[in-house]
Image (spheres, helix red, strand yellow):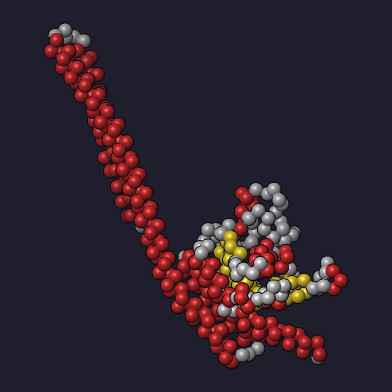
Amino acid sequence: MMEDSNAGKTENWFVKLHIYFPLVVALGEGVTFLVLIDEFYKKSHEVSTHVFFAILLFLLITTCGFAFYYIRKSNRYHKDINTLNTEKQALIAKDKKNEMYKLAFKEINHAYLHIHKLNRTKGSTKDYVTALSNFCTHIADTFKNITGDECCVCIKYTSFVNTENSKSGEQEIAVKTLCRDVRSFHDRGNQDNGSVHLLKHNTDFEEVFKKITEQHNKCYFSNSLPKVHIYENTSFIKYGEESHKPFGQYTKPDERSKAWKLPYRSTIVAPICPDVDERKKGEENKYVQGFLCIDSKKEEIFDLITDVEIILGCAYGLYNIVTEFKKLIEEEETQQLKT
């Protein structure tokens, strides 16, 4: 690596020498011209001497003009070369990413093997958590290959809860963590530790839910959460903030970025629900079983088109399995109440 750096510096030095050499020559001629004037021109009154110095002056002016023209053209040429190299590197990176997308389908197939096996054998809630955690790990590995950076994946499921602010006993929608990929499980844990994460206090979940009520299958997508004007997230409290909405309306993006405490800055959140044609207007609460979420600590990491389609497709494929999991949870809770 050090040798490549030294070679690059040497190459840049030769390029600069190549560009500015004509100017050096012109300056040399100018100095020579001034010396000759001082030594000969002032002491001589012959016409031939005047003609000689006139020709010499013309050559000096011509050389200087050529030098400046050459430098300008050379700078433009090298700028064009640098632009072409940048575009070439971008194309190479794009081709590499396209190759990663091809490999992604293989990884996603492995992810669904755990789901299909569970569909055939059924099992306990623990079996569901294990299978879905393996699913999340495969999806996280897929996007690590695509983006080149660590990505975290989790599955959330919806639940109705009573809150102090509930009107006349009306329940509100809460979002609970079902599972995470193996790596983020060690960093963030798999449980909500008694915290109630209301859907209405989380910008991403609420916006996805609103889109579903409008009969759309759309994700919440942000490649720079600190730049979102008013972003609410109940996890802010877990990471040391006093509120799920720690930033005021007039907080500048730079200030939000510096004070940001969440372990991720980019995210895609997709609904786990039936296709648009299978839904009935006004029964959104019934159909939204949960959310598939992926995030990264880096900004500008996800692709708005391809990555969103992948996450949407994966989320759609989880609908039946998450629905079954929720039924098991309800059965276990009912059984506990009886005993």
Q: Quadrant of residue 75?
A: top left
The residue closer to the viewer here, 230 or 194, is 230
Task: Decide if residue 249 is on the left or right side of residue 23.
Answer: right
The residue closer to the viewer here, 16 or 314, is 314
Residue 330 can be seen, yes or no: yes
| Count of numbered circles in the view | 0
Q: Quadrant of residue 275?
A: bottom right
Q: Identify the residue at image location x=37%, y=49%.
A: 83
Residue 195 can be seen, yes or no: no
Task: Decide if residue 92 is on the left or right side of residue 262.
Answer: left
Residue 237 versus residue 65 in the image, above or below: below
Q: Identify the residue at image location x=73%, y=84%.
A: 330
Q: Residue 110 in the image: state x and y as whole percent.
A: 49, 81
Q: Identify the residue at image location x=76%, y=85%.
A: 333
Q: Quadrant of residue 191?
A: bottom right
Q: Residue 339 in the image: state x and y as whole percent.
A: 81, 91
Q: Residue 211 in the image: state x and y as whole percent.
A: 65, 66
Instruction: Residue at the far right: name it.
Output: 168
Quadrant of the rendering where the N terminus is positioned? bottom left
Task: Decide if residue 169 is on the left or right side of residue 235.
Answer: right
Q: Residue 176 in the image: state x and y as whole percent.
A: 69, 74
Q: Identify the residue at image location x=72%, y=72%.
A: 282
